[in-house]
Amino acid sequence: MKTERVPQIVLGAGAGAVLAGAAALFVPGNLGGDAPAPAPGAAARAVSAARAGAQASLPELAALIGDREKWLRAHPGDDASWAVLGGAYVERGVRDGDTASYVRAEKALKRSLAAWPAGKGNVDAQLGMGALANARGDFRAARKWGEAVRKQQPRRWQAYPVLIDAYNGLGDYVSAGRAMERLRALRSGAPALSRAALVYRDRGWREDASALAYDAVALAATPTEKASCLVRLGDLAWERGEPVEAIASYGPALRLVPGHAPALAGRARALAALGRTDEALRDYAAALKALPLPQYALEAGELYESLGLDGDADTHYEVLRVRATEAGAHGVNGALVLARYEADHGDPDAAVRRLRAEWAKGHRSVHVADALGWALYRAGRPEDALPYARRATEQGLRSALFAYHRGRIERELGKWGPARRHIAEALRINPDFSPLLAPEARRALAALGEPPEGGPKQGYGEEPAWRSGSSRAGSPPPRDPERQRPRAQARERRGPEGTPSPTRSASPSPSPSSGGTAPGSLPPGR
């Protein structure tokens, strides 16, 4: 009969805000049965760091994986060691981009559950499965595993980071906030504070988020953990439009962990904003070598495109497609980054199909809402796009990209006042939020002109002079900041000056049926 245990599982921090979910390294208090602790060395340090709630280095993580693999070859029925190994595989997959590790993680965790089923109390493997689901972008599955653990052991603090990531992916920010409050009540330290900083950021509490991120840096227990917390701090500064302050965080992170990919990518964004494009491209190349995420390839490609280097841009877009396809073969959901690529550089209708499928699965985060709204706009359906853009900008998160997308959609619909307000807001939040879109935002705002004297007209503001035929109409019409990539496809889909073709009709969104919300439609209210 299985002897009762009280394992002490700990959850390591994720690889940075660029990832949808967080990795987890699960280390029970005893490694199951007669399993010995790892011999002194890198594997033992990984266990020690994990039990302290800190993040092990990649070499230490590799040593732990090797140690447990060796042990399990001789002891295949050790459920706890299978859970440790599965969690370590998830962590490795998140932090070095080897998505094949997720397949190994799933096999290891299922072996643990076969040896000791979830119904009999194998919480370790359930938490591992939840972390794996988050890393793959399957947020409904992650929520299921996390809620099962919470029901069995409400005070098991490791369930709450899994739930926070899952709720965020599903767009349930109220539940994410509650899970964060419970986590902080049960656990202190850098991992809890770092996650709380993101929850506060998503609520729009930027100063509070930064304060928590500073505290997380101070409390980080290992160099790797401190580097991750510094990246979080830098990302928050970047989102506020403070590239110099962001670099001041990314630099120390890279001194602690040379080659730290999230720090390199973050510094690349900040350097590009400062006009130091050669250095930015160098950092993107290093980040992609260390962690070949599709998102990094998309950002680097857009920087190359902004410089007129279309050949280099296309090379990076191809890297994006290849990496997303490989990850998809290992169960990773890359719909969001692929849809963002398609909307701006490929086939917007394909982007709409991908994102409607995500929405139907319950993945209704502000990121999916914004991407779906923008894809609908790019596909020539601004009326359908606006409800999604509103949802993305009204949940609390202050995003320059979201505000710009909403302003562009409103401009297309003739809502001059809101368009002027939201494009200006984007530039206030972060004047250099995108090497391609920020210059277009400035041109669009200049073309819209100043608000009319005497207040707004009919709630929307006066038409720009180039549309109303006033005495100011001698100014040229604004350039539509639609990108024409691929150019031949874009010309076929769009009319003159990048506006929707007059021969294209907009398709209405499906209406909610009596059984609930139609797949892909926006539910009423928030």
Image (spheres, rainbow, N blue to C red):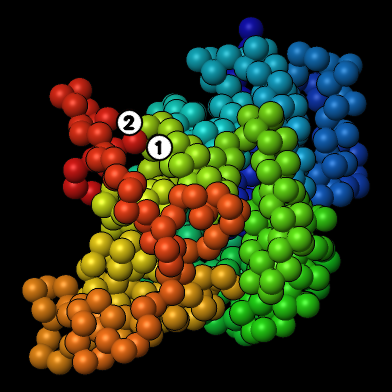
Q: Are marks 1 and 2 in contact (CB under 8 Å)?
A: yes
Q: Which residue is mark 2?
A: 519
Q: Nearer the viewer, residue 328 or 171?
A: 328
Please provide percent x and percent y for residue 502: 32, 53
- Disc 1 secondary structure class: helix
Q: Is residue 172 left or right of residue 226?
A: left
Task: In the rendered view, tell whether residue 324 sits above or below residue 216.
Answer: above
Please provide percent x and percent y for residue 507: 29, 40
Task: In the rendered view, tell whether residue 112 sits above or below residue 449.
Answer: above
Q: Residue at x 16, y 73 (%)?
A: 460
Q: Nearer the viewer, residue 145 or 448?
A: 448
The amino acid pointed to by label 2 is: Pro
Task: In the rendered view, tell whether residue 93 sits above or below residue 410.
Answer: above
The numbered dot on residue 356 is 1
Please provide percent x and percent y for residue 167: 41, 43
Task: In the rendered view, tell whether residue 483 sits above or below residue 74.
Answer: below
Q: CA distance from mark 1 to mark 2?
A: 7 Å
Q: Quadrant of residue 238?
A: bottom right
Mark 2 crowd level (few <14, some 14–19, many ≥20, 10 Å Cα): some
The numbered dot on residue 258 is none
Q: Is residue 469 left or right of residue 85?
A: left
Report the label total: 2
The amino acid pointed to by label 1 is: Arg
Q: Residue at x 20, y 23 (%)?
A: 515
- Disc 2 secondary structure class: loop
- Where's the N terminus, which quadrant? top right
Please provide percent x and percent y for residue 296: 68, 57
Q: Residue at x 67, y 12 (%)?
A: 115
Q: Residue at x 74, y 49 (%)?
A: 319
Mark 1 crowd level (few <14, some 14–19, many ≥20, 10 Å Cα): many
